Amino acid sequence: MVGGGCNGLAIAWDAALRGIPVLLLEKHDFGWATSAWNSRLIHGGLKYLERGDVALVRDSLREREWLLSAAPHLVEPLRFCLPLYRGATHRPWLLRAAMLAYDVLSFDKSTAWHRQYSTGSFVRLLPSLNRTGLRGGVAYFEAQVAEPERLMTELAAAARAAGAHIVNHAEVDGATWSGEGITGLRFTDTTSGRRYDVTTRLVVNAAGPWVDDVLTAMHSAEPTPLMGGTKGTHLVVGRFPGAPSDAVYYEARSDSRALFVIPWRGRYLLGSTDDRFSGEPGAVSPTAGEIDYILAETNTLIPEARLGRDDVLWGYAGVRPLPYSADGPTGDITRRHIVKTHDGPLRGVLSVIGGKLTTFRSVGEDVVDRVLKLLGRKVTRTPTRTARLPGAEHPDRNAWIAGYLERSALPPEVAARLVASYGIRAQAVEDIAARDSRLAEVLRGTRATIAAEVVFAVEESQAVTLEDIIARRIMTGLDDDLGLASLADVAEVVTRFCGWAADRVETDMAHYRHYIKKLQPRYSGTP
C-alpha cells in the first residue's frame, strides 16, 4: 500500500480487518496533504446532485452519517445557509427539488431536514447578507471535521490495531518485477536515509495527487497521466463585522463558482477555488490573485465585512486528486473514485484515482473487495460499516465522558479539550501526564494544550518530526500564529521526555519555520 492519506489509511484498515497482511508506506506524514488541506467538511455534495450524480451523493450522505457516529468527538453537524439571488444559476424551483431529493437520499440521517425561507425570514436569519436581488434561501445540515488531521491519526490507530503495519516518512523509489507482475518494492526512510526492500504480489497505489509519480518510480516507463488535480485555496480570518453563526454556501457574483464562509475553531474559513493545477502538489500555496478573489466575493456577500489582505491570518491550498481531464469546466470532473487495475508492465498494481474526504471508508471497502477477488479469496462483508474509530469505541460514550470529566485530575478546561480532540483516548493522555508534573503543564502560547500530548504523539501516534507533532497531532499548528509560540516548549518536551537529540531538534525547529512559510499570506503571485 502506497499513500497514507484518508483513502490509503482506510484501505489498510479494511484490508487488515479482513485478514490481508498490509504494509502501508507514506512518504511524508499521515494526512499531510489533500486529506488536511480541504474545506474540512463531511458533506453529501449538493452540487454533485445538481449534476445528476445521485449515486455519489447517496454514498456521501451515508458515509456522513457513519462518521457522525464513528468519530463524534471530531465530526459534528453544521448548519448551512444557501441564499438565492436573482440571476444566479440556482433557480428557486430547481433548488427546492434538489433539497427535497437531498433529504430523501439521506433518509437515514440523524440531522434535521432542510427548511425554506422567504426573503424576509432569510434576512432575519442572516441579517448581514447583501440584500440586493435576494430571493430567500434554504438552510440544511452537513457536518464539519474541524481537524481532519486528528481524524487521520484515529484512522491510522484503527489500522494499526487491526494488524496493519504503517510507516510514515517512507518514500517508494523502485520496484522489482517478474514475468507475472510486481514482486517487491524499494523504499527509503527519509529521516535516516536507510533503504529497504519488501516482497509483495500486489500494490495499491493510493498516493493521491502523486499517483502518477509513484507509477513512474515503480517502473521506468512514463505512465499515461491518470491524475489531473485542481487547486482549492482557503483563507483563515478572525471574526469580522457581519460574520454569520452558520456556514454560508453561496454563488460567486463574478463567475458563479460555489464558495463558502464557514465558522471554524473560533474563526472563519473562506473559499475555495477550483482551478486546474500542474506542478508539485506539496508546494502549493495561495496566490495574491486567489486571496483577492476570495476576499472580494466575501465582501460582496457580506458588505459590512470589508475584509482586506491584512485581515488574513493565514491560508492554505490543496490539490484535489481528480481524474485527468484536459479541458472543460473543472466542476464537471467527477468526484467519484476510480480504481484502475493495471495490466502489462504494471501488472499487480491498482491505482486509486479521485475520491473525497467524506467517502474514505467506502473507498476502502470497494478497493479491498477488488483486492480479495484478485487474490482469489472470498469477498466477505467489511466490518468497517459498523465500526467506530478508536476515540469513540465505548458503548456509552456520553456516560464515559461525564465520568472522565468528573474524575480527571487535570484542570476542567484541559480535560474538556482532551475529550474534544481525543475522545475516550483522553485518559491515555492523562495517564502520561501523571508520570511527571511537568507533563501536565500547559504549553506556552496555548490555552489548554499540555506537554503530555507531545509525548502521546510520539509514543502512540507515530510522530517523527516537530512538524508531525505541531501540525497534525496536538494541532497548535492551526492557531493564529501557526504554532510558533508553542514550538520551543514542544522542542523541550521531545528533548527531555522522548530522548530526541538536541541537534535533531534544532534542525526540526528550522524546518518547521520554513514549513509554515507556505501558509503565510504572500501577495507577489499571480491569479
Image (tube, rainbow, N blue to C red):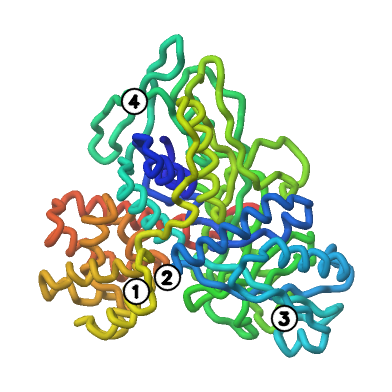
The residue that mark 3 highlights is 303
* Horizontal arrangement in the rendering, residue 64 relative to residue 483 (left or right): right
What amino acid type should be assigned to the residue bearing mark 4?
A: Arg
The image position of residue 238, as x and y in percent, is 52, 77
Disc nearer the start of the sequence (1/3): 3
Front tag of 3 and 2: 2
At horizontal 50% and vertical 62% (from top left) the residue drawn is: 67
Disc nearer the start of the sequence (3/2): 2
Front position in the image: 3 or 107: 107
Give the label on residue 419, or none.
Answer: 1
Quarter holding residue 41: bottom right
Q: Measure how far apart labels 2 and 1 are at the Cα level.
A: 7 Å
The residue that mark 2 highlights is 73
The residue that mark 4 highlights is 186
What amino acid type should be assigned to the residue bearing mark 1?
A: Val
Disc nearer the start of the sequence (1/4): 4
At horizontal 74% and vertical 50% (from top left) the residue drawn is: 53
Quarter holding residue 342: top right
Look at the numbered discs 2 and 1 and tell me whether their residues touch, using CB distance below 8 Å.
yes
